[in-house]
Image (tube, rainbow, N blue to C red):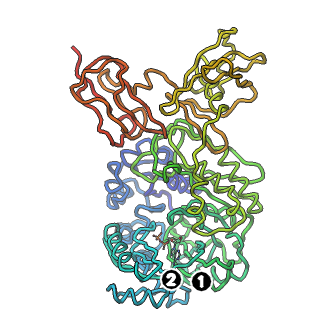
């Protein structure tokens, strides 16, 4: 076995690989970009090497730099994780040429599966069912249109070099074919530098079911059952599970056999996934699935397979790469229970899943859930930033239980007790999806999320109880962490008497006023609004809501939703003053409105610009009288700490 390996990746997958390496007594080397200097994967590794600047093209995609780091540190092998260089055959060849081991398949196997058209032709020859379609060389419009007619509409045009759903067009009618073809080719050319496409039958009511395969260098290949990844948004996986709901013995037998055949056809070594598209219009049937593509790496969703089989797939990758045979034979691999994984992303589901950034000022995962096993694969810890440079995945939450129903309940419970503040995340969306009737009933198909998007992404609305909880949390003398329970913060605070304290919060530009008095049993009476006739809400000590106070804000958690209010601290609201002459953005956001210009003389308290962040509008006002030297541009997207306003030097 290797003594030391380098992990050419970041985030949760780098950490996941290190966990197994550590358990096996293998030392680990991390690589990092400038943006990741303090990232968790760097902290966890035994050694870490800087490979360049934040953009991936200047760091994580620099194969030679990574190989050099491995050689300098004496690592014997490189684990690529997923994404980045994991499916780049040229990189594999360079790794091997420099005397190192690539923990993954051969460059030849990657190449064979790299282009969708060639892979499909290869699979057809190997006797694996392939979606009816045209995978040939001809690219002329007339010829492809004729093929589309032969296949029968609707058809799907796909970039042969495609990935991530790019260069893909659904065509319902021959009239739309020419434009769709041109658009797919344009997009493919721009994204992959290869405009060639294939045309295939569009499967209606499709499900995405994939089979985990594993090969070694001794001619063995096995499968580790299937995963269902039909819960997709724009062809991107959202929730994955194993086994596939409704899978019967005959269909499983046919699919896993086809997958192993596919792996053997290319003498596959290491972890791989055969993706099938399934026509689920009449349930799962052994003759209604077709090869779509092979992913020649460890998948994001591999943990669900680990949960149902008890196999550590990274350990197998390491053993196979070190030349050992597969640890188990096909008969020894068994399936037990049901596992589900949800991908927790920093994105705003209410705004069509706009990627979000920001600092994770508060991040709590449950330790366990009732009646199920919980696993959280996270790439970040509280206080870390979600940077705009990389995939905004925060964590994968995985639950395993005896049945699908129990696994889904466990996952919903886990999501509903996860707390994130500081960045917008998709927790509420995930929890609503897991609790959706059709999803829960196993009526899966790739269009489910799009069909229900409105209901699944409806923003949580603040109710009086949320406001009361937020007011209670900020009523204490000291409300900043590390005191998460607002009530212990106010314990002993005896200044109330019968005097009502006026408190203010803001949500967006809406000012919220409340009057707080001590309630008889040690709680608080909170009257919302200026009207003295309004009955107060009593917040008792033992009914403490889940809240997080973070710089300038308070977030109230209810279920999987977090409702954030601004705490009007004059300094915070004015942005952060740096060096007295400039205001910087307190959080990442959009400069929505600019009300002043360079050379303007402004008065203290005068509104200068509106920053939209965390779904709210923040008015940034002048902290003092002065003359503006420089001000942000309207419409600009700014990062945490970016300069918003600079004042002229004061005499
Ligand atoms: P990419 O490599 O760009 O991700 P894939 O070929 O893996 O593209 O397909 C991505 C997704 O598109 C699938 O998971 C499935 O939801 C959908 N899809 C692909 N091929 C078909 C098809 N023939 N019919 C219906 N849906 C399809």
Q: Nearer the viewer, residue 129 or 444?
A: 444
Where is 441 relative to 614, above or below? below
Residue at horizontal 34%, vertical 25%? 578
Distance between the Cα atoms at labels 2 and 1? Answer: 20 Å
- Find residue 23 and report its horizontal and vertical position in percent: 60, 54
* Left or right side of 187 for 392: right
- Find residue 403 and report its horizontal and vertical position in percent: 76, 62
Foreground mark, 2 or 1?
2
Q: Nearer the viewer, residue 73 or 338?
A: 338
Task: Say whether mark 2 is within 8 Å of ligand 1.
Answer: yes
Question: Which residue is disc 1 drawn over?
Answer: 258
* Left or right side of 314 for 411: right
Where is 557 relative to 94, above or below? above
User: Dot 2, how many residues are within 10 Å of its Cα: few (below 14), some (14-19), or many (20+)?
Assistant: many
* Left or right side of 538 for 155: left
Tell me the tag on residue 493.
none
Element assignment for label 1: helix
N-terminal-most mark, 2 or 1: 2
Residue 246 seen in render: yes
Residue 314 seen in render: no
- Find residue 41 and report its horizontal and vertical position in percent: 48, 48
Quadrant the C terminus occupies: top left
Element assignment for label 2: strand
- Find residue 124 and report its horizontal and vertical position in percent: 50, 88
Residue 472, quarter of picture: top right
Residue at horizontal 36%, vertical 55%? 56
Tell me the tag on residue 201.
2
Residue at horizontal 65%, vertical 73%? 225
């Amino acid at each position: 076995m290797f003594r030391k390996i380098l992990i050419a990746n970041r985030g949760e997958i780098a950490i996941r690989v290190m966990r197994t390496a550590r358990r096996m007594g293998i030392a680990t080397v991390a690589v990092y970009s400038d943006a990741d200097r303090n990232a968790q994967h760097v902290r966890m590794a035994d050694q870490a090497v800087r490979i360049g600047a934040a953009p991936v093209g200047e760091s994580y995609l620099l194969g030679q730099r990574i190989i050099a780091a491995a050689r300098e540190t004496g690592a014997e092998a490189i684990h690529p994780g997923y994404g980045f260089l994991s499916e780049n055959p040229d990189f594999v060849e360079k790794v091997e040429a420099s005397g190192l081991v690539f923990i993954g398949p051969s460059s030849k196997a990657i190449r064979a599966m790299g282009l969708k058209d060639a892979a499909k032709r290869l699979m057809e020859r190997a006797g694996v069912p392939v979606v009816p379609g045209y995978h040939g060389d001809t690219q002329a419009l007339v010829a492809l249109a004729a093929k589309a007619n032969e296949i029968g509409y609707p058809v799907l045009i796909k970039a042969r070099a495609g990935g991530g759903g790019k260069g893909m067009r659904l065509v319902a009618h021959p009239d739309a074919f020419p434009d769709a073809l041109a658009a797919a080719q344009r997009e493919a050319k721009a994204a992959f530098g290869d405009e060639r496409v294939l045309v295939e039958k569009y499967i209606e009511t499709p499900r995405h079911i994939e089979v985990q395969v594993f090969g070694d260098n001794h001619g063995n290949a096995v499968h580790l059952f299937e995963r269902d990844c039909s819960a997709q948004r724009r062809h991107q996986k959202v929730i994955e599970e194993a086994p596939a709901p409704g899978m019967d013995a005959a269909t499983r037998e046919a699919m896993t056999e086809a997958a192993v055949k596919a792996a053997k056809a290319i003498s596959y070594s290491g972890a791989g996934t055969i993706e099938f598209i399934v026509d689920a219009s009449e349930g799962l049937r052994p003759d209604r699935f077709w090869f779509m593509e092979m992913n020649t790496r460890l998948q994001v969703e591999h943990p669900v397979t680990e949960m149902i089989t008890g196999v550590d797939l990274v350990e197998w990758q390491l053993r196979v790469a070190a030349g050992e045979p597969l640890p188990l034979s096909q008969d020894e691999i068994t399936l037990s229970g049901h596992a589900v994984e949800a991908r927790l992303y920093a994105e705003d589901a209410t705004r069509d899943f706009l990627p979000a950034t920001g600092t994770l000022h508060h991040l709590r995962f449950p330790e366990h859930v009732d009646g199920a096993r919980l696993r959280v694969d996270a790439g970040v810890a509280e206080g870390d930033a979600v940077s705009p440079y990389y995939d905004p995945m925060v964590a994968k939450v995985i639950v395993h239980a005896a049945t699908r129903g129990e696994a889904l309940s466990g996952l919903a419970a886990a999501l509903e007790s996860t707390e994130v503040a500081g960045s917008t995340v998709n927790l509420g969306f995930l929890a609503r999806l897991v609790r959706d009737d059709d999803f829960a009933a196993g009526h899966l198909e790739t269009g489910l999320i799009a069909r229900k998007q409105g209901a699944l992404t409806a923003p949580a609305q603040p109710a009086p109880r949320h406001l009361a909880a937020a007011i209670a949390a900020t009523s204490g003398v000291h409300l900043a962490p590390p005191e998460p329970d607002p009530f212990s913060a106010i314990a002993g605070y005896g200044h109330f008497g019968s005097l009502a304290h006026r408190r203010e919060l803001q949500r967006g530009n809406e000012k919220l006023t409340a009057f707080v008095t001590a309630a008889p049993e040690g709680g608080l009476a909170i009257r919302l609004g200026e009207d003295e006739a309004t009955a107060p809400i009593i917040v008792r000590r033992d009914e403490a809501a889940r809240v997080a106070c973070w710089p300038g804000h308070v977030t109230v958690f209810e279920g999987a939703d977090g409702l954030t209010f601004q705490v009007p601290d004059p300094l915070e609201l004015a942005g952060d003053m740096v060096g007295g002459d400039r205001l910087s953005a307190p959080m990442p956001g959009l400069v929505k409105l600019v009300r002043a210009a360079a050379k303007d003389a402004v008065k203290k308290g005068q509104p200068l610009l509106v920053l939209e962040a965390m779904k709210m509008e923040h008015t940034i006002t002048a902290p003092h009288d002065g003359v503006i030297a420089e001000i942000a541009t309207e419409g600009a997207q700014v990062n945490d700490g970016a300069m918003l306003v600079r004042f002229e030097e004061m005499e």
